[in-house]
Amino acid sequence: MRARSEVLETAILGILADSPLHGYELRKRLNMVLGSFRALSYGSLYPALRSLEQRALIAGTETKDAPPQHALSGRRSRIVYELTAHGKEHLQGLLSSSGPAAWEDESFDVRFALFGKTDAETRLRILEGRRTRLAERLEMVRESANRTRERLDEYTLELQRHGLEQVEHEVAWLDELIDTERGRARAPRSEARRAPGSTTQNEAEGDPRPGTTIKERG
Amino acid sequence: MRARSEVLETAILGILADSPLHGYELRKRLNMVLGSFRALSYGSLYPALRSLEQRALIAGTETKDAPPQHALSGRRSRIVYELTAHGKEHLQGLLSSSGPAAWEDESFDVRFALFGKTDAETRLRILEGRRTRLAERLEMVRESANRTRERLDEYTLELQRHGLEQVEHEVAWLDELIDTERGRARAPRSEARRAPGSTTQNEAEGDPRPGTTIKERG
DNA sequence: GTTTTCATGTAACCCGTTACATGATTCA
DNA sequence: TGAATCATGTAACGGGTTACATGAAAAC
């Protein structure tokens, strides 16, 4: 049995928690959740499913093509996986953790996609953790940029500028989300006040000087 | 001798083309160029250098700590690498290519950082190739979003929306760069009209409906 | 009738990181 | 004196992809 990647397993368990699925269908949902629209290969998925089954976190049932009435249900034999009791427990454990492993690049998207099954405090801690992480990154890059700006050519400079802009944009996004989550925490009776990130009139005026745009928080 | 990754090798050759360097210093420059501010490990760098040397694309000279005058030059023995004639040739070949290998996620940043050594037609083809690539991606995601929107929960939806926004932003960036490059092609006498991506008053009014913001091009 | 989509799986490979080993030099 | 930085390297591992094998049903 090969390596097991916590982020992939979390995604699988999280999706199967909603409804039992077979591998082929599971993969499509996975691609929505596993950031950046990349396509997970079967060469990764099926071994992962087997590993989870061997550890009794999920249970597979082969549906032997039982045609109930007439047509439209044919297909070939699929293996539908669902969470075991042990698996549900394990998932709860994963979802309640909020350490660095939750807000790093590789895992944040998956954890965010499963926010619907995550309690409010954990959500907030993950969002704040990621924000701090990105702010640190900005700090580092800006610093090194100040030291090396002169001897970099036009294009490298532009690449750097664009990279910073992307990160700044994500920080602004996180700020909105954090505000929304805090609002929910204070007034939990009214549900869905507004979509978490729908653009407000936020920073519409030009040229916010880098370094003052992002203020520390949390 | 282990695998050789074209993108890493291109980056190394590109940097060494500017000035000979030893591994430790090379790594720092590499981190500027190799997108996303990630830090390349020595476990990748040194084997790559050895591989390049064995193929006679670079040549290493061990500087045996020759203190020229008094102090300030001590340090320990470093190996300074520089391009061979063969290496320069090889790099030219890499830089003049503009296939999918140039505009994919993993390689685009490196190729862009080396635009200073790339001829104008190739630059334009790479930018347009990447733009088309991203536009395809947008198309695909929007389509699948339309099919599955209803049964996705709030957070997954928000993640998707943010992902689209990021890609749209990169497309807008590419559009500006393409305009700049075309301007340069038409009027090559005046150099550096403006920094390639310095923000114009572009899309300052709110809520451009997705789908109309990005128009086909090239 | 052939191409596309559904469906499951394996073995080989790729390209990176982590952890370790080693040692000199500079800075607090 | 002890920590940080400079400098080079190797072995083991990790977590993915590619390419292959197989086959049935649906769509064109």
Image (spheres, coloured by chain):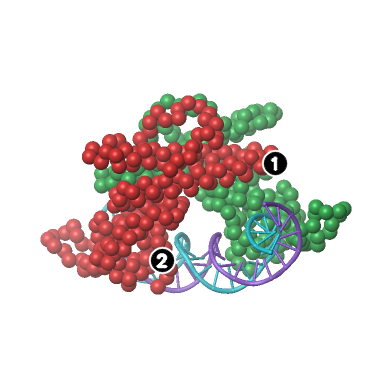
Chain colours: A red, B green, C purple, D cyan
Q: Is residue A154 above or below residue B203?
A: below
In the rendered structure, the answer to whether residue A154 lies left or right of residue A80 reads right
Foreground of the two, A18 or B139:
A18
Query: Which residue is labeled 2 in the image?
Result: A4
Element type at marker 1? Answer: loop
Number of dots carrying numbers: 2
Q: Chain of mark 1?
A: A
Q: Is residue A6 above or below residue B134?
A: below
Residue, far left: A69
Give the CA distance from mark 1 to mark 2.
44 Å
Foreground of the two, B28 or A154:
B28
Local packing at callout 1 (Cα closer than 10 Å; few below 14, some 14-19, many 20+) is few
Image disc number at residue A151 = 1
Foreground of the two, B96 or B80:
B80
Element type at marker 2? Answer: loop
| Percent x, y of residue A49 | 34, 66
Local packing at callout 2 (Cα closer than 10 Å; few below 14, some 14-19, many 20+) is some
Residue at point 30% right, 67% down?
A57
Q: Chain of mark 2?
A: A
* Quadrant where the image shows the N terminus of chain B: bottom right
Residue at point 45% right, 45% down?
A131
Q: Amino acid at mark 2?
A: Arg
Residue at point 21% right, 68% down?
A64
Residue at point 12% right, 61% down?
A69
> Residue A85's quadrant in the figure?
bottom left
Q: Amino acid at mark 1?
A: Arg
Residue, far right: B69
| Percent x, y of residue A110 | 38, 53
Same chain letter for marks 1 and 2: yes
Foreground of the two, B41 or B116:
B41
Q: Is any part of residue A218 visible from this angle?
A: yes
Q: Is residue B28 above or below residue B146?
A: below
